[in-house]
Image (cartoon, rainbow, N blue to C red):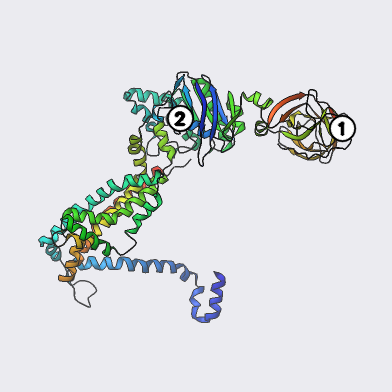
Amino acid sequence: MADMADLRLVHLSKQFAAAAAVHDFSLDVSEGELMCLLGPSGCGKTTTLRMIGGFITPDAGDILIDGTSVLRQPPERRPTAMVFQRFNLWPHMTVTDNIAFGLRLRRLSTSTIERKVTETLALVGLPGAGGKWPHQLSGGEQQRVAVARALVLEPKILLLDEPFSNLDARLRVRMREELKTLQRQVGITTVFVTHDQEEALTLADRIAVMNKGVVQQVDTPSALYRRPQALFVADFIGAMNFVQTQYSRARGAFVSGGVGVAASGNWTDGQAVTMAFRPEDVMFVEGDSGVPGQVRRVVNLGHYLEITVDCPGLGAIKVFADGQHPATDGQRLSVFLRRILLYADGTSVTEIDTPRLSRLPPADTLQNSATA
Amino acid sequence: MTAVASALRERAGGLLWFWSIGAFRRTLPWLFLAALAVFILGPLLSLILWAFAGQWFYPALLPDEFSLKWWSVVFGNRSVVASIKNSLVTAPVVTLLSAVICLPAAYAFARFQFPARRALLLSFLTANSFPKIGLYISIATLFYRLHLMTTYWGVVLIQLVGTLLFMIWIPAGTFRGINRSLEEAARDVGASGLRTFFQITLPIAMPGLLVAGLFAFLAAFDEAQGTLIVGSPNYITMPVMMYTLVLNYPQPVGAVFSILLTLPSLVLLLLAQRLLRQGYLAAGYTL
């Protein structure tokens, strides 16, 4: 249906007095790709999207669609179509008129317009809704019409600004799946803005994680989850335990409280390193081989248990376990880590598979923390 | 409430015995409403009776005879008919002119940030914040020099002053209430800024603009002070003529003219009510 096109953002920058700024943002979105801009509110993801759509002029940098700069074009001339968070449809027009508005501006024949509107309404799963008024539609249907209105013009790039954030959770999940299917079917290059990591992980081909106007990491969902390059990403995507450690040359290990993690390589003595591990990478082991701990709390989340364990040296850590290994409050056990990531100065240094944990005589008294 | 009631009962003893009767308490609001209706509609009713009364002597409750003779007196008077004509050709022109001048300004106040925005917006209140008569006198001295006194355009300009407030403040609020993404969505699908305003913003704002137009029309139509100073004796409108009629003619003539003066407002209000109900229904969707 749409022409395939790629999108390139080159050193894009925008400063504001109040709104979220963007610093030196570069990103390549390839043909037919669904790219998510993910980050907390105020990270500049919407600002970036609005710059692509032409509603904000960047201070510096360039936006290329199919290798051509669109910077000098106002929104109405850009080959982009935007779906907004809410207040998408014009209340004084029927669904058909809403969708046909852009087509009529292009002076297409009445029969062509009629055919395209019917086709697009069928595409978004609302055949026969053309005669309705926006206020007669549910929130989900309104957003579907908004998507139809964007797609009917066969834009090169589809831009979506948190389009489902005003819908209830169940509908949001369904709309997400529908959008993914639709995007595959049409094959349109898409940029999707969200603050919901789950939404980004399920929808996107690739995700650009942003914080404070700076891109932290651009990667596929699985790579982003498995190997977060920055401490911010590690914290933002999924649940993660963090432990502050210091390298001890004498022991050849990162030390936190009474626990040591053996590390090879050349480290400076006393270097501060943040150790991170996923709750699903924590295992309970028999006997003396692991780090001893005591179960503080067990929360049953249906298909798995979320267990909080107090481990001297590691602090309170979160563990995901299946129902096969039931734990009870106050139970004493030993934990073992399958895989850890190490961060220094906020960026990833290395990862260690099946690290060797050791219990040390209580010499260090470092502060520990764990977050998820 | 009950505590107060019981305290009252104790204090007043048997005097407020009727307070305990439920039926009495339930009728109380209706009594208030009825009193209010009499207060507002009573004079209107007597106005209608006076307008159609041929003869009405005290102490008769109703006129002794009904007739249309005062209506023929009013419509037979050339200067009275001229004043009706004058009012009908000024008030709509004032309203339209006010809309043409004020609506773009209201849009700017709602959408753009510029220096002294608040101060300018407040300045439209100043015309209504001190006695207008002083303002009109000083405007009149200016009009003398510009040869606008006792002319049609002089009257239009002086009536314009009173409409500015309505035509700036109400539309500015209406425009501000329209979400920007509705306009951005239109730009996004290819509409220019001007087309977006006329095909998206203006239709959505219409209910609010109609209310503003209604108020402006009534302000212009009812304006008497400034019109008297600037327009008389050559250019007399209905409210100005009212002074003459009340002072120099029998009472029924004033009543007839009052009804004529009320008629446009009444028609417009009924019309606006229908339009508004439809307009707000269309606009009142939420996500």
The crowding category of the residue bearing disc 1, from other C-alpha atoms within 10 Å (few below 14, some 14 to 19, many at least 20), is some
Neighbour tally class for label 2: few under 14, some 14-19, many 20 plus, Cα within 10 Å? many
Q: Is label 1 in a helix, a strand or a loop?
A: strand
| Residue B178: percent from left, percent from top | 41, 43
Q: Check the image and report above or below for A319 versus A118.
A: below
Q: Find residue A259 and name its label.
A: none
Q: Residue A53, which numbered label?
A: 2
Q: Identify residue type, mark 1.
A: Arg
C-alpha distance separating marks 2 and 1: 56 Å
Amino acid type at circle 2 is Gly
Q: How many marks?
A: 2
Q: Is residue B18 left or right of residue B262?
A: right
**Quarter of the image where one finds residue A214:** top right
Q: Are marks 2 and 1 in contact (CB under 8 Å)?
A: no
Q: Quadrant of residue B57?
A: bottom left
Picture residue at 33% right of the left edge, 60% below the top: B128
Q: Nearer the viewer, residue A344 or B84?
A: A344
- Same chain shared by disc 2 and disc 1: yes
Q: Quadrant of the C terminus of chain A?
A: top right
Task: Examine the rendering and report whether any part of residue B144 can be seen.
Answer: yes
Relative to the observer, which residue lies in front, A203 or A364?
A: A364
| Residue A343 in picture, x, y percent from top left | 71, 30
Task: Indicate the position of residue B23 as horizontal and vertical percent values.
Answer: 47, 69
The chain under label 2 reads: A
Q: Is residue B265 visible?
A: no
Image quadrant occupied by the N terminus of chain A: top left
Q: Chain of mark 1?
A: A
* x and y percentages locating residue B48 in the rendered image: 23, 65
* Residue behind mark 1: A359
Q: Residue at x 39, y 29 (%)?
A: A76
